[in-house]
Image: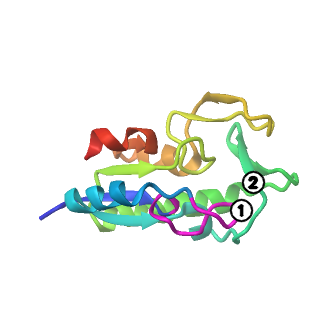
């Protein structure tokens, strides 16, 4: 039986990125991941009720604020809880997440000023998953997982 891997849906080619696009990994990488893992896709942002497309958002401390100035923290928290519920339901012990995302970013996110400045920190879902004991990886670490 393959190990289960929670994975950001945008990395698999789902059009759930804030602008309606995708952050898809290469076809070869996806095939290699599927050979090793049972993939469990999730987009915490859309799971939390945010539309596609949506205004880009960034974390400001414990809050998540859209570029338009709307507080979307509640949607991000709801999506994080849904991601955690999926991880638990499928017994995922690892997660491959979209780097720098205000939801999925693990270890580094944008600073909340919308000026592309990176700071240490986790997105809301990454923070929730890490606290629950999942091992987190960003897409730049995919080769080490295969």
Q: Mark 2 sits on what residue?
A: 56
As measured in the structure, the alpha-carbon distance from the residue carrying label 1 to the one carrying label 2 is: 8 Å
Looking at the image, which residue is at 70% across and 54% down?
73
Which mark identifies residue 29? Answer: none
Q: Is residue 41 above or below residue 132?
A: below
65 or 132: nearer the eye?
65
Q: Nearer the viewer, mark 1 or mark 2?
A: 1
85 or 31: nearer the eye?
31
Where on the picture, by quarter, is residue 112?
top right
The type of colouring in the image is rainbow
43 or 90: nearer the eye?
43
Q: Secondary structure at mark 2?
A: loop
* Residue 45 image position (x, y, % from top left): 61, 62
Q: Is residue 62 above or below residue 4?
A: above
Looking at the image, which residue is at 74% across and 57% down?
72
- The magenta stretch spans residue 85: no
Please say if the residues under marks 1 and 2 sit with CB atoms less than 8 Å apart. Answer: yes
* Residue 110 image position (x, y, % from top left): 68, 36
**What span is in magenta?**
10-22
Q: Mark 1 sits on what residue?
A: 19
Does residue 86 appear to the left or right of 31 in the view shown? right
> Between disc 1 and disc 2, whose residue precedes?
1
How many neighbours does mark 1 have within 10 angstroms: few (below 14), some (14-19), or many (20 or more)? few
Looking at the image, which residue is at 42% across and 55% down?
26
| Quarter placement of the N terminus | bottom left
């Amino acid at each position: 039986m393959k190990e289960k891997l929670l994975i950001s849906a945008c990395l698999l080619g789902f059009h759930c990125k804030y602008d309606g696009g995708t952050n898809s990994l290469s076809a070869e990488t996806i095939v290699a991941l599927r050979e090793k893992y049972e993939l469990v896709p999730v987009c915490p942002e859309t799971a939390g009720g945010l539309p596609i497309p949506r205004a880009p958002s960034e974390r400001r401390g414990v809050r998540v604020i859209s570029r338009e100035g709307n507080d979307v923290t509640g949607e991000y928290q709801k999506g994080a809880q849904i991601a955690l519920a999926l991880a638990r339901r499928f017994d995922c012990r690892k997660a491959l997440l979209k780097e720098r995302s205000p939801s999925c970013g693990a270890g580094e996110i944008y600073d909340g000023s919308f000026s592309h400045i990176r700071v240490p920190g986790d997105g809301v879902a990454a923070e929730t998953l890490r606290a629950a004991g999942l091992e987190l990886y960003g897409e730049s670490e995919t080769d080490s997982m295969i």
